[in-house]
Amino acid sequence: MPTNDRLLLQILILALLGASLWVLAPFWSALFWAAVLAFASWPLMPLLTRLLKGRENAAATILTLGWMLLVAVPLVILGFNLADHIRDAMNLVKDLQLRGLPTAPSWLDDVPVLGPRLVDLWNTIDQQGAAFFASLKPYMGQVGNWLLARSAQIGGGVLELALSLVLVFFFYRDGPRMATLVRSGLQRLIGDRADHYLELVAGTVQRVVNGVIGTAAAQAALALIGLWIAGVPGALVLALLTFGLSLIPMGPPLVWIPATAWLVWKGDYGLAIFLAIWGTFVISGVDNVLKPYLISRGGNLPLVVVLLGVFGGLVAFGFMGLFLGPTLLALAYSLVGDWIAQGQNPPQNPSGPEQPPV
């Protein structure tokens, strides 16, 4: 093919790719989450296909229905119960605003050395809390508008999630063909290293998925145990909320701290102390141990690269950055390593050592 025709064809292909990306732009988030869900559970697809004697459509349908049940059922339970819990929280805030904290328990004054200071601190918090709620009163309308806007975003997120659960079927069914197409394109671009970088991306995303989802599940289970022992109502709903909030940094304290405050308001000080300790060292503490272990297990990348990618990706790209950040850093780390290695080991001259001029 003449050079001009080849250049024209390349420009046409790039233009078509750009137009295609523009058409798909409204669905990027849904496509991304569908790809993550399919990739995270992909080992089940070939196994189920073999059990169903090669019927890929049936296997993809079963896995898609499994995701729908796994995601939709907790959301429905949470939706039906969240309104009641929000109402209870608003009543608690009104009671605190009107009556303040209950009287300091008698045993608090008996604590050696620190007792009188703890009682003074209790009374100070009570007084300042009343003033704090009074100062917030003029802004309650703005808070309501903010919550309304967030509710609209949550509604959009639910629709996006529903679309992702539909698209995941096609990722299951057409996954091998998509992988072959991507591999062929990368081989045209970077040659034999295409398989290495595909494995790098696959391994990084798989470890991050395992680390994030596994840690969220562990924190939800531990939250359910602690809330059940403490006698907090709606422990299952709060545990499901903990699972969702575990996907963002410092999310679980948004559940167990208000639950602890509710126990204090009810006068169950012993259970409140238990839940505060359980939340600090068990629910939130497991994040510092389990997530790094699951993310770093079986990988050759330094853990700091993956963790910086997780937190930096959240800041740069939002929730999608949870997976995009570590993947981009892993690719950059590997590319730089390959470039340095090629510089240290330059290709040898196939014709033998260069002869000195005569």
Image: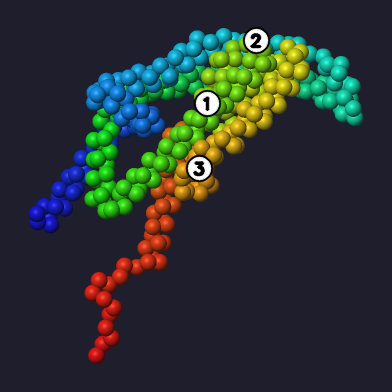
The dot on residue 296 is: 3
Answer few, some or many: residues within 10 Å of disc 3's Cα (few below 14, many 20 plus, some between 14 and 19). many
Q: Which residue is mark 1?
A: 217
Residue at disc 3, secondary structure: helix
The dot on residue 91 is: 2
The dot on residue 153 is: none
Q: Nearer the viewer, residue 277 or 95?
A: 277
Q: Amino acid at mark 2?
A: Asn
Q: Position of residue 200 (x, y in %)?
A: 39, 45
Q: Residue at x 65, y 10 (%)?
A: 91
Instruction: Give the Cα distance between marks 2 and 1.
Output: 30 Å
Q: Earlier in the sequence, mark 2 or mark 1?
A: 2
Answer few, some or many: residues within 10 Å of disc 2's Cα (few below 14, many 20 plus, some between 14 and 19). few
Q: Nearer the viewer, residue 14 or 183?
A: 183
Residue at disc 1, secondary structure: helix
Which residue ends up furthest to the bottom in the rendered image? 358
Q: Amino acid at mark 1?
A: Ala
